[in-house]
Amino acid sequence: MFSTQKKLLLLFLFLFGGLSTAIPQPTQEKDPFTTFQETNGATNKLNFFFATPNRYKKSSAYDWLEAVKVYLSTAEKSKDTFGIKAYRLMQAQLYNDISDHYKSIAIANELYQEVDSLESTELKLILQLLDQNYGRLQMYDKQIEVREQMQELGITESVPFYDIYANMGLYRKAMEQYILAVKPTIPDNDHLALAKHHNTVGYYLYLDKSPETATNEFKKALGFLEVYINDISRQKSEKDIFESEALKAEIEGNIGKCHVQLKEYQEALPLLTSSLSVLEEFNHGRYKNQIVDNTLNLAETHLILDNNQTAKQLLDKRFEDIEIRQEIKRNKLLAAYFDKEENFRSSSGFYKRNEYIMDSLKANERSILQQQLVAIVGTSDLENSRRLINEQKLANERIRNEIQAKDERINLVIISLIFTLLGFMGLVYAYLKSIKNQRLIAEQKYIIENSLKEKDSLLKEIHHRVKNNLQMVSSLLSLQTRNTKSKAAIVALEEGKSRVKAMALIHQKLYQNEDLSVIEMQGYIESLINSVQSVYKKGGHNISITVDAEGTELDIDRAIPFGLILNELVSNTFKYAFPESDENGKIYIHLRKNGDKGYFEYSDNGVGLPVDTDERTSNSMGLRLINRLVNQLQSKLNIDRGSEGVRFWFNFS
C-alpha cells in the first residue's frame, strides 16, 4: 500500500515539475538599438535600420546618431566605400528625424551626386528624404523638382501636388487632388489602403473646419481598418501590425480633434489621451505633427474642463519642430491659462507674440503663396510646354525652307507681290480691327466673370454669417436652458434649439457647395439626423435609419421647410415612438423630385399615433408646425396609422 502511494506521489511531482517548466516565462522586449549594435556588417545594419518601424522606442535618435558617427569614422579609416555610403544614408535619416533638415539635405545631396553608383533602393531613400526635408522647410519648388526626378527615374508614376496644396492652406483643393490621384489606384479588397485614404480625406476636411463631415470619413477609415485587423486569412508581419496600431491611434486622435472643434470636450478627452500615448510610443519622426496637434487639442480640452495644471504641463512640453499655426494656437492657449490664473502680464505677452506672428504672416504670405502657386502650375504644364516648343521648332524649320525657296524666285514675282501686298494691307487692317473688337469682348467677359465670382463669394459669406448667427441663437437657447428649472420650458427650448440647428445646417450646406442655388438633400438629411441624435443622447442611437434621397436637390425655399418638417418627425420618433426599447426600431425616409413633381415619405415602426391624434393636432406645436410647413409647400399632409408605426407622406411641386 505504501509503495503504491509513493509511486503516485513521485508521478504527481514529475508531472507538476514538467508542467511548471513548460510554462513560458515572460521575456523582456529587446531594445532595437541594442540589436542594431549587435548586427554585423554595414549591409545588415542598413537593412535593419530602415526595416525597423519603431527605432526610438527605448533609445533616442541622438543615441543612434552617435553610434552611426562611430561606425562612419571606422568605415572612412578602412576606406569601406559601401559602408561610408550606408552610414551617411542613415545619418541623413537621423538628422531628418531630429528636425535638423538642412544637415539632412546636405548629406542627401552629397550622396545623390554619386547617382551612377547607387542601387535603386538607395536612390529612392535619398529622394524621399529630400522630399520630406524640403516639405518641412516649405521649399515647395525644390520639393517639386525632387518629385520630377523620381518620376523620370521611374520611382513614381506621376508628380502629386495635394500635400503641397495642404501645406499652403488650400485644404479643399488638396482633398480634390488627393481623391483624383489616389482613389482609382486602390483595389476594393485593400482595406488598409482604404483606411488610410479615408483618414487622409477626413484630415483635409478637419483642417477645412468641417468636423462633422470629417468624422464620417474617420469612422469609415476605422471600419476598413477593423476589417483589415480581423482578416485572419492574411498573414501580417511585425511592421504591418505596427502600422495598423499606429494608424488606429492616428484616426482616433483625429476624431478627438473633431470633437474639440465641435466643443464636445468630454468626448474628445479619452480619444486624444489614448492616441497621444500610442503615437508617442511609436514616434520616430513620422508622427511629430500629429503629436503636436493632439497635445495642443488635449491641452485645450483640459483648460475648458478646468484641469488647468494638466493643461499647463502639456503646453510646457518641448517640441523639436512646430508649425506656425501650431505656435499660434499654443500662444493662445497659454494666454488663456494665464487669464484664468489672473496673471494678466504673462497673458498679454503671449497675445503680443501672436500679434507679431500674424503681422509677419500678412506681410509675406501673399507673395510666398503666389510663388508656390506659380511653381505648381508651371510644373503641371511643363510637359505641354516642352511639346509646344518642339512643335514650334519644326514649324520654324519649315518656314526657313519656304523662305529659301522664295528667295530663288524673288525676281520673277516682285511685281505681283506689290499688288498682293496692297490687298494684304486691306486684310491686315480688317484683321487688326477684329482683334481690337475681340479684345474689348474679352475684357468685358473678364469683368463679368469677376463680378460673378465676387457675387458668389458674397453669397457664401452671407450664408456663412447667417449660419454663425443661428448657431449663436442656438448657444443662447442652451444658456437659457441651464438657467431654467421648468421641465416644460427646458423641453420647449431644446425643441427650439433643434429647429434653429436645422435651419443653420441649410446655410452651412449652401456656403460649402459650389452651386449656391440648390442643396444636395442626401447629405443634408444625414447631417440633420446626426444633429438630432446629439440632442437626444439617451435615445435614438439604436434605431436603423434608411435615407433614400440620393441625387435629389432642392432650392433654399423648399429645403428649409423640408428640414424643419424632418426635424419634427425625427424628434417625435426619438421621443415617443419607442417608449420601452429602440433595439428593433426602424425609420425610413424617402425624397424624390422629378421635374416639377416631388414626393416625400417618412415612416417608423414604433407604437404609432394615439387614437385622438386629430384632437391633439390643434394643441401640438410640432404637428401644427408640420401642417403649416406642408401648406407652405402648397401640399397637404397625409397620415397612415397602422398597428405598428406611422407613415407621413405628401406630394409637392
Image (tube, rainbow, N blue to C red):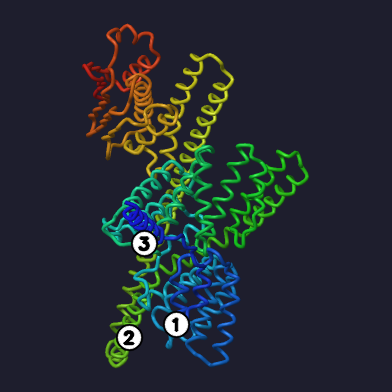
Q: Nearer the viewer, mark 3 or mark 2?
A: 2
Q: Disc 2 vs disc 1: Cβ atoms closer than 8 Å?
A: no
**Distance (Cα) linking label 2 and label 1:** 54 Å
Give percent across and percent down for residue 141. Answer: 50, 70
* Residue name at image x 46 percent, y 39 percent: 459
Q: Residues within 10 Å of mark 3 (few under 14, many from 20)?
A: few
The label number, if any, that marks residue 397 in the structure image: 2
Q: Find disc 3 in the rendering and name its residue.
A: 434
Q: Earlier in the sequence, mark 2 or mark 1?
A: 1
Q: State which quadrant residue 620 falls in.
A: top left
* Residue name at image x 59 percent, y 53 percent: 326
**Distance (Cα) linking label 3 and label 1:** 71 Å
The label number, if any, that marks residue 43 in the structure image: 1
Residue sticking out furthest to the front:
1
| Above or below, comparing residue 545 to residue 61 in the picture | above
Q: Earlier in the sequence, mark 3 or mark 2?
A: 2
Label 2 amino acid? Glu
Label 1 amino acid? Thr
